[in-house]
Amino acid sequence: MTDGTTVWSTEQGLRALPEQLKGFGLMHVAMRRDAARLTAAAQRGSAGSAAVLAEWFGRLRSVIDWHHHSEDEILWPYLRGRVAGFDGSGVLEEDHEALDASMRRVAGVLGSGLRAELPEAAQAFESLVREHLRHEEPVVFPALAGLSVDEYLRVERRIIGSAPTQVMTYLQPWMFDGADAASVRAVSATIPAPVRLLGRTVLDRRYRRGLGSVL
């Protein structure tokens, strides 16, 4: 889908996005990546314990839950007041509700130890993630691109500031996992230097240790 000139999608990377939107874009890329990792781990019968996989999925779920609440409570209301015709309700809210239900199902399967049900639950979750982002990106990215850089970054700081500690300490290495160098540089430039350093050292090592159950 396009606005006439630009394809507003991160499925093939972030090249179409303005520099200031690449952090937002990286979150979408990371959601698809981890949904696919869950599906792959479920299909091959990951050697990791269900408890370890459940812990990893719990972190992913926390990030997605925060991301969606920050959209519903901060970003959509802001854009409704600034961008003519922007709504953010309807299909996007329905998608958020469907994803919440899907994540509850995956968590329930992992918590119950019924691993035979995991491949189908994981595939359904991945399909919903991909479908939701196909709905959201052509609506939200053009609206965000219409804001000035300074205005967008102010809103982004409000969103990031709403993240609970467990999300904040996971977010940077999670976003940068597998990201191209240019996008990492663009997003890093908006992060305070001490936080950048913490993210690429202590927090990155912790993040990498938690991937053993899905890689």
Image (cartoon, rainbow, N blue to C red):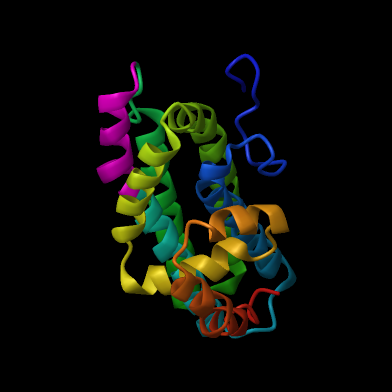
Q: Is residue 84 left or right of residue 116?
A: left
Residue 166, placed above or below residue 154 = below
Magenta stretch holds residue 77: yes
Viewer-side residue, 195 vs 171: 195
Q: Residue at x 50, y 47 (%)?
A: 24
Q: Is residue 58 left or right of residue 179?
A: left
Instruction: Tell me residue 9's x, y (percent).
Output: 62, 35
Instruction: Tell me residue 166's x, y (percent).
Output: 37, 74
Q: Residue furthest top?
A: 4
Please state, as top left, top right, bottom left or bottom right, where the C terminus lies in the image: bottom right
Residue 112, can we see it?
yes
Q: Residue at x 59, y 53 (%)?
A: 186
Residue 113, can we see it?
no
Magenta stretch holds residue 187: no
Range covered by the magenta-colored residues:
69-84
Instruction: Tell me residue 211's x, y (percent).
Output: 62, 77
